[in-house]
Amino acid sequence: MNGVEGFMYPNEIELQWSVLIVLYPFITGLVAGAFILASLERVFNVDAVKPTYRLALLTALAFLLDAPLPLQLHLGHPERSPEMYFTPHSTSAMAMFGYVYLWYLMAVLVLEIWLDYRRDIVLWSQESKGLLRLIYKVMTLGSTNISKRSLAIDERVGWIVTIIGIPSAFMLHGYVGFIFGSIKANPWWSSPLMPVVFIFSAMVSGIAAVMLLYMALTKLRGFKIDMRCVDTIAMYLFYIFIIDFSLEMLDLIHRIYEADESFRSLDFLVHTQLFIPHIVIQISLGTLVPIILLGITQVTKLPEIVRKRIYAVAGSLTMVGIFAMRWNVVIGGQLFSKSFLGYTTYKMALVTREGLLAAIALTILPFIFLWILMKLLPPWGENHAHKAVAAD
Amino acid sequence: MNLSRRHFLVLVPAAAVAWKSVLAGTPEESPNYKMSDHWWGMLIDIPKCIGCGNCVRACQTENDVPDGHFRTWVERYHVTDENMVNPQVISPDGGKEGFPVAEEDAGKYFFVPKLCNHCADSPCTQVCPVGATFTSPDGVVLVDQKYCLGCAYCVQACPYGCRYIHPEKHVADKCTLCYHRITKGLTTACCESCPTGARQLVDLKNPKDPIHEFLKTHSVQVLKPQMATGAKVYYNDLDGSVR
Amino acid sequence: MSAFKEAGHLFRFAGLFVLAFLVFLVVRHYVVPKSFGQYGHYRGAAIGEMAARPVKFAGHETCEGCHTDILDAKKNGKHAHVNCEACHGALANHADDPSIKPVLPDTAVLCARCHTTSAAKPKGFPQVVPAEHSNGLPCETCHNPHSPAMSAGGAK
């Protein structure tokens, strides 16, 4: 058996869940994290991050639209996926997730974006021409009411939606964690901590993503980066990262201490096949280094240019580290035998439906979606709809 | 004896009657087979297994199992230490063509046939998002291959590694306890072809089934009892080293 | 009252939801298979479909219905409980249509699979080292497969 060391049950040798299933939690994590950043401003009134509010929402939507695609490519029968909506099995986390996704997309994200942009949409529907005009007109749902009262109602409802949105975002990604965490057959996955770790690592990756996007896009547009905004984001990133790291260390220490029947097999795996992805990339480069870098900016006063460089490096390493975490959970969880007597290897294909090229394409696609969304609903504006109401 | 052309449906009247209803797609109406009368399982007698691989080959023939995938397989254990945590286990092509000759040494050897345990509290049916895999009223865990999405969640959830995704149909596949046979009064293909009687179909709801007496008089285990899956494949004399 | 007018757009959004939900219900009614839920959260008809699959192994009772002479030969020997198809392979097609002649198994491969000496096999089980045992002669020279004791004589 090529690639097999020791003994694997015969049906276990080939991995079932590929790099696409690694991509999926990574993408939904970015969605949840970006939304939490947006909610910092909307609900917790952290004024400093206002410049990233609309960008965060559009980022969340762009990634949420991309999220089902890796799943569709993975399914043996994607044409049957509506069955999850027509006959969801209530004991299956995966089935319930279909509804959580739909709820989050329509009742939270799309609604919040619509409410925040509505005044602009109405105005754009009157100013633009041709196809664009038609698109905006459809988006107004036929209502051109942008009176003070209606906008105040929008503001109120939007605030409620964000309040509901925070636990919804936690559900969205916590569920993905539960999909893994509830599998008693797999000791690498089975843990009550799994949904919590997923949520916090999602927040870390989402916040880092929006921070990087904001910095990059602002630079590309030739504007000045609002340092108060970015410093605040970096602070939140730092503290949430500390929580995330603590949770992961708790899991690790607990595992090592209890040393149950799976421990020797998993320990060997982490020291061999998973050494680079787990110890080097996820823990050292992807968690410790960003935490230390961000920590330095929190305790010392550094010039703006240095802070920008540090945020860029820390943010990028964070994204890589969180991706590595998803990899180590999904792929790592399939590399060892459930007999605890052997290991297999993941042979990632290149051009197949579930291969590397597909994964790369699906990673680039959300940025294309974001570009389209930014063209349609520019996130840069002096005043947001709700702030405009306050100014009147 | 003169073998005149006789349709074998005529030769086996009970099977014939059962088969007609079953072929009509309504096994529950078969006068010979009521789902609620049965609760299926299997008994595997470890000391009797000689590792010949007949069961693996028979299953493949009966059920068109694709190469490289296994609805049933046989493992050979070689236990050399008192810890029992380091057995050497092999299963060359699932044991389909038997095993290489083992040399006598200080350790002990034995064979362990494995298959779907048709768990009463099956984790695979719990996680299926659409209801494509289910436990039938007579205790057999089945896959509805016309409904399955091929998401492989059930494959991940099975603690025993008995499921796989069919490489051509792209749906989940696994041992069906030869449902198409047991509903006609026949035994499973693996039990039929086992030369030593190491594998035996059992019907836990049938008071006359020898399993009841066997369970009272022998030391019997299920695989991974700590998983509390309600496994219904019972192993006689299962060693503590078996994973 | 004016609040409703000012929130008209929200009612339109909600209306879209309601409409989508109704469409969903209608589609669901037509798409979900009729037998779904009959016995549980699955398509009830699947059970019948599974049970209706064709059988490839006829089962020893079927063989014994015709081949009573073989049954007699077997019943007092060591292979009494070895079913016919364990050696002869799947023969439901032959039972269905006896003009289909089954291929006789190659004893060199078949017998060796069970009876080659190996430390892994149970101690009481009859095992030989094929190369040393028969000097290259086929097994059936001395052993009738249906009654393998030497006293029964070989298969002719």
Image: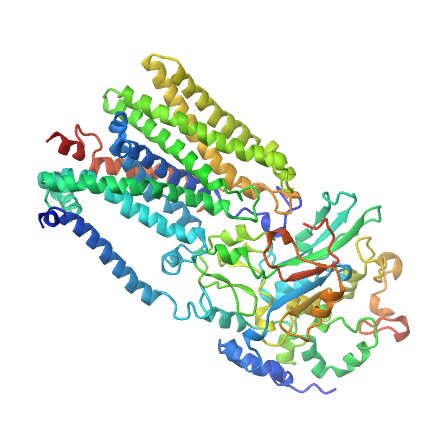
Where residue C71 appears, as percent x and y from the top left, is 77, 79
Where residue B189 appears, as percent x and y from the top left, is 65, 68
Taking the spot 53% from the left edge, 77% from the top edge, the residue there is B22
Image side of residue A260 versus residue B111, left or right:
left
- In this rendering, the answer to whether B139 lies above or below A236 is below
Taking the spot 37% from the left edge, 22% from the top edge, the residue there is A312
Q: Quadrant of residue B67?
A: bottom right
Image side of residue B186 versus residue A199, left or right:
right
For the image shown, how many numbered marks are present on the structure?
A: 0
- In this rendering, the answer to whether B96 lies above or below C9 is below
Look at the image and name its color scheme: rainbow
Is C14 or A58 nearer to us in this picture? Answer: C14
Image side of residue C39 versus residue B138, left or right:
left
Q: Quadrant of residue C84?
A: bottom right
Taking the spot 59% from the left edge, 47% from the top edge, the residue there is A13
Image side of residue B43 versus residue A214, left or right:
right
Where residue C118 appears, as percent x and y from the top left, is 81, 54
- In this rendering, the answer to whether C80 lies above or below A87 is below
Taking the spot 59% from the left edge, 51% from the top edge, the residue there is B159
Q: Furthest residue to the front?
A: C1
Q: Furthest residue to the right?
A: C151
Q: Is residue C18 visible?
A: yes
Where residue B124 appears, as percent x and y from the top left, is 53, 56
Is A36 or A264 nearer to us in this picture? Answer: A36
Is B170 or B232 nearer to us in this picture? Answer: B232
Is A175 or A10 nearer to us in this picture? Answer: A175
Q: Is residue A351 visible?
A: no
Quadrant where the image shows the C terminus of chain C: bottom right
